[in-house]
Image (cartoon, grey):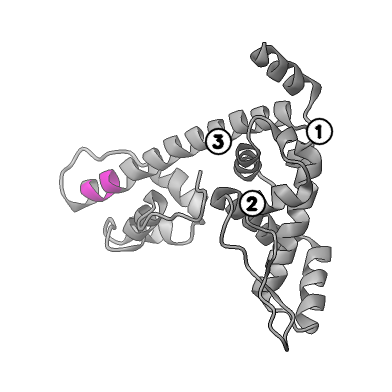
Amino acid sequence: MVDGGQQHPQQPGVVFLELAGQGLYEGGLLREALASLTNPHLIKRCAALEALDATGPATAARHTLRLPARRIQHLTEEIDDLNRRIAEAVKASTPGLLDVRGAGPDSAAALLIAAGDNPERLTSEASFAALCGTSPVEASSSKTQRRRLNRGGDRQANAALYRIVLSRLRWDDRTRSYLQRRLAEGKTRREVIRCLKRYIAREVYRLIATPSPAASRARAATAT
């Protein structure tokens, strides 16, 4: 699970695809057989490569491709399992949060973590927006009325809202229309994204401010 905008310089999948696309070949046949495959099929095909009895470059190439492909499959299974467990925990705590358009298990979990175990302490959706770093910061002058990005707040929650915005900009027609309309009004893309994050924070707050009965019982039991 990649979160908070942090990226590793060499992801395992990237390294593997570089190996598969470079000079690892078996008389040209292995490379030719792999060249037309999409990434998931490439990994599956390389994981199934059988070792040759003979030694030499062909055997080394197959071994070099098979090991990372199987490792990628194993890590993918672990990621899928963790995502399922996170999704189950989110559903138990805040039903409906995963129904928010663009919100996956990792983003939903980050927002719940930011709210904490006692979301009732957040007195308003404005306080939750400030917690997530999406509340506007006045940057007006005598001649210009504008607001700038908020660099404070919980950056993990802010990153989660940003991922939801990007998802909606890709798949949601209303969000894309909103972007184009605000750009035509003179807003910058960054300013429009800030507005979208603010709207999503309001939508999320309404859900987390009303915990499920099961979550309420669990908190009551913990308090006693």
Estimate how packed mark 3 is, as few (under 14), some (14 to 19) or many (20 or more) residues with alpha carbons within 10 Å.
few
Write down the residue under mark 2: 132
First in sequence: mark 3 vs mark 1: 3
Q: Residue furthest front?
A: 142
* Of the two numbered discs 2 and 3 in the rendering, the one whose residue sits closer to the viewer: 2
Q: Give the secondary structure at mark 2.
A: loop
Q: Quadrant of residue 173?
A: bottom right
Q: Amino acid at mark 3?
A: Asp
Q: Tell me the SS state at disc 1.
A: loop
- Quick one: label 2 or label 1, which is nearer the N terminus? 2
The residue labelled by disc 1 is 210
Given the current orientation, which residue lies at the most extreme bottom position? 143
Q: Residue at x 27, y 55 (%)?
A: 26
Q: Does the magenta segment cover residue 27?
A: no
**Residue at image location 27% in from the left, 63% down from the top:** 23
**Label whose residue precedes the other's in the sequence (2 or 3):** 3
Quadrant of the drawing holding the C terminus: top right
Amino acid type at mark 1: Thr
Q: Is residue 179 above or below residue 91?
A: below
The 10 Å Cα crowd at callout 1, few under 14, some 14 to 19, many 20 or more, is some
Look at mark 3 in the image and give the residue it sits on: 80
Mark seen at residue 28:
none
- Magenta stretch in the rendered image: 60-64
